[in-house]
Amino acid sequence: MKHLYLTSILLLSLLISGVVRAQPSLSSLNIPSDGDSYTVFTNTNLSASDTEGDPGANQTWDFSSMNAGSSSTLNYSNASSPNYPNSNIKFETQGSSNYFDVQNGALTYYGFSTTNASSNFSDGQDQVRFPMSFNDSYTDMFQGTYDAFGQNFDRSGNLNVTADGYGTLATPQGTYNDVLRIQIIRSSTDEMNGQTSSSNLDTIYFWYNEYTPHPIMTYTINYVDGSESGRFANYIADSDVVLNTEEHSIEVNAYPNPAIDEFNIKSSERIHQAVVYDLTGSAVITLRPKSKAFSINVNDLERGHYFYVLKNSAGEIRSRKKLIIQ
């Protein structure tokens, strides 16, 4: 009994001091949707102190003094390009279109297109798989083509992806607790006419919280043939960071939650689409109620945790919240 008492005192003191932090897990809430938009700040002139930081539990990654850099707008929309038939969503920013698939429990990258360069992967890159928690890891192979200024290459390689840390992230825009860091080590080789032309090694870090469907920050280091060719960071505006699934832009009364057979929704505005996702990001129910009040039959869903998204007639997400099936 004395041991239990001392353990309780220790845990209480750790909680008060802020040492113990929740371990975040990524899920379908982190999958981007048509209509998502972000203000992104890019710093291509990092100082010696702007390093990627350490892996591990309860880390603090402090980039608050980093130069703000330039800003731009990043917009997600549905993708229907014949050049990227495997993609269903893209984001566009600063003249670049980047193509992804988000239907198979992963954020799979299929390439980019600009005026002077493009890449197109027949076997895409699983940049993040869902769900994902601290110390989860996987390896993924990819293959495709890379074109730049009229030069055409065959590019192939692999990703080693690890959720290597969690803790607090500070950017010039704000400080965010319970953030998970994803490390991607991407190794690739470019070939032209069957001859190796270059070897590439990129280390990419994504910082996510559990609710924002885009990284709060990314940090990238590029190497070509063993020499560093670039290092830059991106982070989004504080107003674009979703801090809690219970925050929403409309009033929603949803009950019962947990649900068994039926889930009822009453909203302050007309809902044109309601989608229920499982933790892999797969849509398991899609409705078009076009109403302020409607019910969702969840009788066929297995017990567990889900998320639902409500959209208006413009395809904008108006609410994104958790759902538990008993």
Image: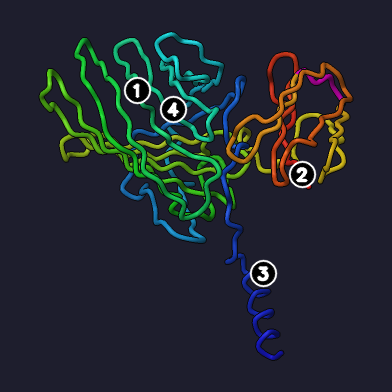
Residue tagged 3: 16
Marks 3 and 1, the one that precedes in the sequence: 3
Q: Nearer the viewer, residue 56 or 194?
A: 194
Q: Which color scheme is applied?
A: rainbow
Marks 4 and 3, the one that precedes in the sequence: 3
Q: Is 215 placed above or below 95 here?
A: below
Q: Residue at 25% across / 26% down in the picture?
A: 155
| C-alpha gap between disc 3 and disc 1 | 49 Å
Rate crowding at label 1 as few (under 14), some (14 to 19) or many (20 or more) other CA atoms within 10 Å: many
Q: Nearer the viewer, residue 146 or 217?
A: 146
Mark in the foreground, 2 or 4 = 2
| C-alpha gap between disc 1 and disc 4 | 29 Å
| C-alpha gap between disc 4 and disc 3 | 38 Å
Residue tagged 4: 70
x and y percentages locating residue 295 in the rendered image: 86, 28
Q: Do the residues bearing badges 2 and 3 touch, measured as CB atoms within 8 Å? A: no
Residue tagged 2: 325
Marks 2 and 3, the one that precedes in the sequence: 3
What residue type is disc 2 on? Ile
Residue tagged 1: 121
Mark in the foreground, 4 or 3 = 3
Left or right, 83 with respect to 224, comes to right
